[in-house]
Amino acid sequence: MWLVLLAPCTWFAFLPLVVGYSFARSARNRAHRLFPRHGHRAVDDGQVTRVQKVRAWTAAAMSLMLLAVYGKPEDVAEAQQQYMMRLAVTPPLLLLSAPVVIALLFRWASAERRSAMRASVRAALRSAGWYVGAVTALPLLGGAIILLGRNRSPSAGVSEPTPWLILAAALPLVWLLFFIGFATGPAIRTGFNTATVHAALPALLTGTLVWEFTVISLVAGGLPPGPPLIQALAVIGGPASVTAVVWWEIRRLRTLFGVTLRAEPRP
């Protein structure tokens, strides 16, 4: 409304904002159709959710306490770098880990269960393909825009095709940026829709990823600050507590909801 009322003063910003809003809305709708925001659990267990939140907040508090007591300024900067690294590494690490865990579940499952899992795997692969395609197309379009800009003649006018080619590459680039921004969070939470494959798969993926992150953090940043005993507890305590919660969740899935990992032995 304000843009319309102040049109004489804001005419230059009206069209870009309208186009940007339409692109953002379209990308958001597509991202949420592919990765539903509440599709990260096939079974809604409120007690498990509460325990996971308590464990996450406790881990965050312990990390801050460790930095406050033993940390140096460079340790705080390194912790921030590791956090950003985890954000960047999580999607590709999840794409690499999920097929391995799914293959193990297929090996353990019964023949009837495998046939039901295949359709869900195909749906998860399609959604993952959308995300991988968007991430792959992003640098390709950016490189094409850079090359077109470098090859453009300084005396080129609007009538030449180069500006229109740059615009034709920039529009899908903007849409992909919005799509990746809206899709990354739900895609990570849902494990690229792997919860529909098996109810225990999100828990198994969480247990797998937390140990992989531990190894990556040790290789990239080394041990946390503090005495040797505190360092050992900080390195092992986080993934060990996550693993304990994961196996408790799987046990509840088996006892309360009848979700099993292995096929029942035939009599």
Image: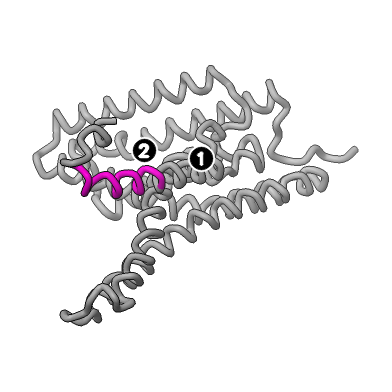
Q: Is residue 118 above or below residue 148?
A: above
Q: Secondary structure at mark 1?
A: helix
In the image, farthest residue toward the front: 8
Name the amino acid, label 1.
Answer: His
Name the residue at 29% across, 71% down: 163
Q: Work out whether residue 78 can be spotted.
A: yes
Q: Which residue is mark 1?
A: 32
Q: Position of residue 173 (x, y in %)?
A: 37, 59
Residue 62, image x, y percentages: 27, 27
Location of residue 143 (image quadrant): bottom left
| Residue extending furthest toward the right | 267
Say which amino acid is labelled 2. Answer: Ile
Residue 118 percent coordinates (x, y): 72, 50
- Please identify the quadrant where the N terminus is shown: top left
- Front: mark 2 or 1: 1
**17 or 216: which is nearer to us?**
17
Say which mark, if any, is on residue 16: none
Residue 158 position in % (x across, y down): 26, 73
Q: Is residue 53 left or right of residue 30?
A: left
Is residue 190 toward the left or the right of residue 122 in the image?
left
Which comes before the other along the chain, label 2 or label 1?
Answer: 1
Give the magenta range.
10-22
Asked whether, in this view, residue 36 is left or right of residue 72, the answer is right
Q: Which residue is mark 2?
A: 236
Q: Return the residue nearer the eye: 95 or 27.
A: 27
Task: State yes or no: discs 2 and 1 in contact (Cβ < 8 Å).
Answer: no
Name the main secondary structure of what is drawn in magenta.
Answer: helix
Please, is residue 112 above or below residue 141 in the view?
Answer: above
Q: Residues within 10 Å of mark 1 (few under 14, many from 20)?
A: some
Query: How many residues crowd around disc 2 within 10 Å: few (fewer than 14), some, or many (20 or more)?
Result: few
